Image: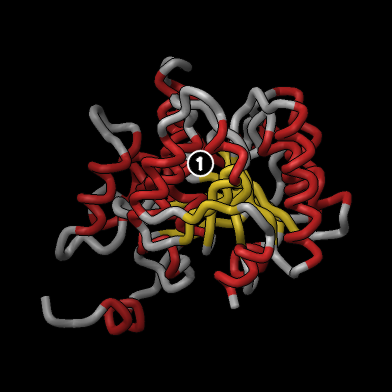
Amino acid sequence: MTETHAEFLAEKAVDAANEMGAYEYLWMQPGMSVRRMAALLGREGAWLPSELVPQDKARETWAEVIAEFERRGVANFGVRLYGAWTYPACLRDAKEPIGGLYFRGSWDLAESPRRISVVGTREVSPEGRDRTRKLVRQLVASGFTIVSGLARGVDTIAHTAAMEFGGRTFAVIGTPISESYPRENAALQEALANKYLVVSQVPVLRYKRQDYRRNRLFFPERNKTMSALTQATVIVEAGETSGTLTQARAALDQGRRLFILESNFHKPGLAWPAELERLGATRVADFSQILEAFA
């Protein structure tokens, strides 16, 4: 194939409902994974999901998705599809670009000039809580959009602090936009969807039908997407097995900046801070170091 991606798109109309229906249908096939989907949609000739799925199956599947959204009270949403011109260019930096995503709220936030992810452990310490709030206050004052994953702990503090300090924030979640996790963050997720932005790459029907334990695999995948959607990630606090480290490694792989707060280097038993610093992460002892990196 010799035509460029832009030339292809210029000549072909993209029906979002048909494409997302096909995308959801592909996710329902046995053995489908992020890696396999990326391979399918990235191979030469397979530009769009509809090229791999019969149109009647795509339409039937999309009708199921809409019915699920109606049942869950999701009235307004948008989509971004790999292969369409609206697909965020920054997501192509991911090792395995996601094929499609859903969002609620203002997509403009995902394209704001300064986007930084603030992440960390669910079991945040009192000191970590204070550091998160202080960091977010400084970032907001410097014009950053705060991005996090709406999880318990550092993520929740980052979102709520950004709102409290009059800043911009959006969430990249590990469930479909029709679900919320943890349950105690349902109101916060709705507030973000109504006033800011909530993004999800999780296929609605696959999530609904498979064993809940397998759905946990979507959380580390969303961390990779969160990194790709932002220009930098800051780790406030994390343990040796934290899912945050998936995002840290993805940031380095994607050519994004990775900042680690100094306090992590002084906790006994933590090997990851020094390891990631050797790989290119920046140890942050003062907020000015983050500003200097963006200068």
* Residue 7 position in % (x across, y down): 28, 84
Quarter location, residue 143:
bottom right
- Is 291 placed above or below 27 here? below
* Residue 137 position in % (x across, y down): 81, 55
Question: Does residue 247 appear in this view?
Answer: yes
At horizontal 77% and vertical 28% (from top left) the residue drawn is 126
At horizontal 80% and vertical 34% (from top left) the residue drawn is 187
- Is 224 placed above or below 67 here? below
- Is 12 placed above or below 267 here? below
Residue placed most toward the observer, 5 or 13: 5
Residue, disc 1: 63
Residue placed most toward the observer, 210 or 261: 261
Disc tally is 1
Question: Does residue 176 appear in this view?
Answer: no
Q: Is residue 122 left or right of residue 160?
A: left
- Classify mark 1: residues with Cα within 10 Å, few (<14), some (14-19) or many (20+): some
* Residue 241 position in % (x across, y down): 44, 25
Q: Is residue 96 left or right of residue 189?
A: left
- Is 45 placed above or below 30 here? below
At horizontal 68% and vertical 55% (from top left) the residue drawn is 146
Colour setup of the view: secondary structure
SS label for mark 1: helix
* Residue 159 position in % (x across, y down): 74, 45
Q: Is residue 193 left or right of residue 3?
A: right
Quarter location, residue 139:
bottom right
> Which quadrant is the C terminus positioned in?
bottom right
Q: Residue type at mark 1: give it.
A: Ala
> Which quadrant is the N terminus positioned in?
bottom left
At horizontal 75% and vertical 35% (from top left) the residue drawn is 129
